[in-house]
Every structure is written in C-alpha cells, then in structure tokens.
Image: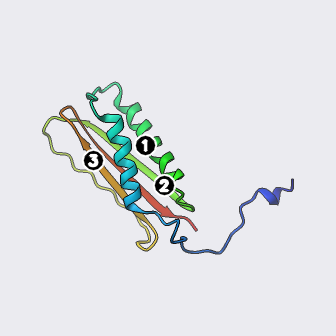
Amino acid sequence: MDKSDTVERNTYIIGPDPQRKFKAAVAKQCIHNIITEALTGRQYDPQEVSALSRTLADSIKDKLKEAGFDRYKLVVQVIIGQQGGETIKVASRCLWDADTDSFAQDVFVNDSLFCVAAAFGCYYC
C-alpha cells in the first residue's frame, strides 16, 4: 500500500453537505436521552462526579459521531454539581461560522444534583 493511499485528500468542499450538517435538535435529543438515562434516580456523590462527567461526555460524543455529522469537530462539555439551591452561571465563548457551526445543550435536575451538558459542532474544511 502506498503511503499516499492512506492520506485523506482535500476535496475543496468549503461547506457542509446539507444532509450531514450539524443539527442542534438531533444533538439535543441525544444529550437529553443520555443524561436522563444515566442520572435518573442517582444521588450526588463527590467521589463519582469526575468520572461520571467524563463518561457522559464520551457517551454523548460517541453518539453524535454515529449521527453522521461528517467533517465536524465535536466538543462536549458536561458539568455536574450538587443541588443545594445555589446559583450557578456557565458561559462559553468561541469563534465560529454561524452558517456552518452550531451547538445543543440540555439540563437535568433532581433533588440531589444538576447536570448541564453542551455539544458544539464546528465544521472542519
């Protein structure tokens, strides 16, 4: 096998295929399903939160990859905290193309914990 056979060649396509564009509604449903299934009935445990948030982020990213958003870089952020009536503010900033890039988020809350999960899809030429 020639080395050049394994290199991805530039297609000179500068925009996403409309059928493969990052769809926020699809991503939001994916996030919702994963965090609801994983966190329903769960109590906040500070010893488990770090590993749990990584596991949820990986699960969301893997599921979004299966959705077929070709040529998108995916960034997933999961924040889990103890429910205590305090206020939390979360903000993200990035530089992106509003025509091709998008994001989705969902929130899960029970008596013991809260979870904010966000997925960002950035088109990669």
Element under label 3? Answer: strand
Q: Which residue is mark 1?
A: 57
Query: Compared with residue 118, is residue 43 higher up or lower down, i.e. above or below?
Result: above
**Outermost residue, left direction?**
85
x and y percentages locating residue 81 in the rendered image = 26, 37
- Mark number displayed over residue 74: 2
**Among the two numbered marks 2 and 1 on one chain, the one whose residue lies closer to the N terminus:** 1
Q: Which mark is residue 15?
A: none
Task: Kindly identify the residue that appears in the image at 12 percent across and 38 percent down.
Answer: 85
Q: How many marks?
A: 3
| Kind of residue at badge 3 | Val
Dot 2 crowding, Cα within 10 Å, few <14, some 14–19, many 20+: some
> What residue is at 46 percent from the left and 41 percent from the top?
59
In the rendered structure, are the residues bearing label 1 and label 3 in contact, judged by CB atoms less than 8 Å apart?
A: no
Q: Quadrant of residue 35?
A: top left
Q: Amino acid at mark 1?
A: Ala
* Residue at mark 3: 107
Label 1, residues with CA under 10 Å away: few <14, some 14-19, many ≥20: many
